[in-house]
Amino acid sequence: MKAGRIIVFRGIVVGLSLGSLIAFCLPARANAEESSRFYREGREHVGQGRNVEAVRAFRKAADEGDAAAIDFLGWMYLEGRGVPKSPWIAFGHFMDAAAKGNDQACRNLGNMYFNGVDIDQDYAQAAKWWEKGAKRGSYRAAASLAQLLFTGDGVPVDKQKAIEHWAMAAQNAPKDDKSLAVALAFARIEAGKPDVAKEARNRLKTLAERGNRPATDALKYLAARENREALLVEIPFVHQAYNHCGVASGTMALRHQGCDVSQFDVKRLCPRSKRGHGVFWSKLLIAAEKCKHRWRIEEYAVTDEGFEKGKTLLLEELSAGRPVIIDWLTDPDNTSAHSVVLCGYDKGTKEFLFRNPALTFPGIHVLSEARFKEIWRSRGYIPNNDVVRRPLIRIVD
C-alpha cells in the first residue's frame, strides 16, 4: 500500500550535521531598502505564478544580503519553481539564510532533517533547527518542535517543554489559526493536571461552538473515553513525515503493541524502501514481523454488502482492543490513497474515530457512518488488482 503525499515545507507544519559549526548573526542591512523592494517583487511574482521572474527578483535581493529572499530562493529550488528542482541547493540557501538570522530558514532546515528527503533523516538536527527558529520568532517551528517532543517520535518525550512551545506558537500565530489552540488544549488535558485540564476542555468547547472541526473531533474523542458504550483503543499519535502516511500509521499500531520505534525505524525495516517514497503495505507486514508481530491484509468489496461485512470486522477488532489500519481516497482527484488508523466507534452517535497522520496533533478525525460508507466506496491503491476493493490491515497477535 502506497502512502499518500503531504507537502509540509511552507504549510502549517511538518520531520535534518553541519549545523553545529554555523555561526549566526543578524541579517545584513546593506541596501536594505533596495533589497526589500526586490523581495516584495519576488513575492508578487510568486503570487501570480511568474516563477522565473520571482527567482530573478529574489536573486537581486539575495545579492544585497536579504536573508528572507535567500530563504525564499531556497524554497524555489526545493519545489522546482522557476529553477531546476534541487533539494541540495535549497539546503545551501537555507543554511545561508539561517546564518543571517532568518527564522523561516531554520524551520525549513528542521523540515528537511525531519522528512529525510535527499538528506539523511535526523530527529536531533530537526529539533535543533526548529528550536533555533522558535527562538527567533517562527511560530510554525515552535509548533513542529512541540509536536515532536510531545509524541516522542525519535526524541525523548518532554510534555512540559512541548506545552511551552505550543503556548509560544499560539501566542505568535495569526488569530485565524486555531489549530495551535486545539493542540495546546488537548496537550494540557493529556498532561493530566485536573484544574488545567478543565480550563483546556472549556477552550475546546468554545472553539467547537465557533465551528472549529479539529476541536469538535477532539471533544468527541474525549467523550468516547468517558462513554462505556463507545469502543475506543488508545493509541499514540505519530505525525507523518514526507509521503509517510502508511509508515506513520504502521508506527502507531506498533507503538500500541509496545514497540519503542519511530516512523523512520519502521521505514528502515521495510525492504528496499526509499526515502521520500511511500511503501507498499506488504512491506509494512514485513516490518511488523521484524518487530515480532504478525499483521494481515484483508479487503472487502466497495458495495453496501462489503461495507456491512467490513464494519462487522472493524467493530470486532475494536472490541478486542486492536486498532485497524485503513486505506481511503477522500478526493477522487488524488493519485494515491491515504492510510489512517481506526481507533474507535461511538455506538450512540454512529461515528468512527481515527488517528490521521496527515493532521497535526492530536490528529483526530471523526466520520459519521454515512460519510465513512461513502469513502469506503472510493478507489484505494492495490497494485495489479483490476477489482476495486477496500483494503485494511489487521493485527493478528
Image (cartoon, rainbow, N blue to C red):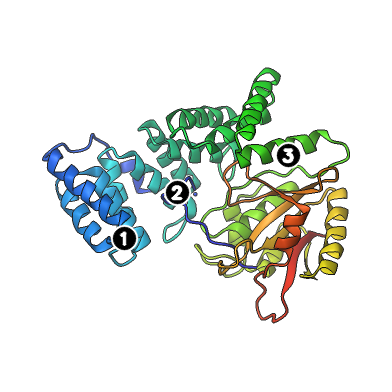
- Give the x, y percent position of residue 176: 48, 36
In this picture, residue 97 sits left or right of residue 341 = left
Q: Which mark is first along the chain, 3 or 1?
A: 1
Mark 1 vs mark 3, foreground winner is 1
Query: Gap in Å between the C-alphas at discs 3 and 2?
Result: 26 Å
- Give the x, y percent position of residue 57: 19, 54
Q: Dot 2: what SS?
A: loop
Q: Dot 1: what SS?
A: loop
Residue at left 60%, top 53%? 263
Q: Which residue is mark 1?
A: 49
Q: Quadrant of residue 192 in the image?
A: top right
Mark 1 vs mark 2, foreground winner is 1
Q: Is residue 177 above or below residue 350?
A: above
Choose between 77 and 89: the one closer to the eye: 77
- Give the x, y percent position of residue 219: 70, 35
Q: Which residue is mark 3?
A: 221
In this picture, residue 243 sits left or right of residue 300 = left
* Quadrant showing the N terminus: bottom right
Instruction: Mark 3: give few (<14), some (14-19) or many (20+) Cα within 10 Å.
Output: many
- Residue found at the far front of this picture: 210
In this picture, residue 276 sits left or right of residue 395 = left
Instruction: Mark 1: give few (<14), some (14-19) or many (20+) Cα within 10 Å.
Output: few
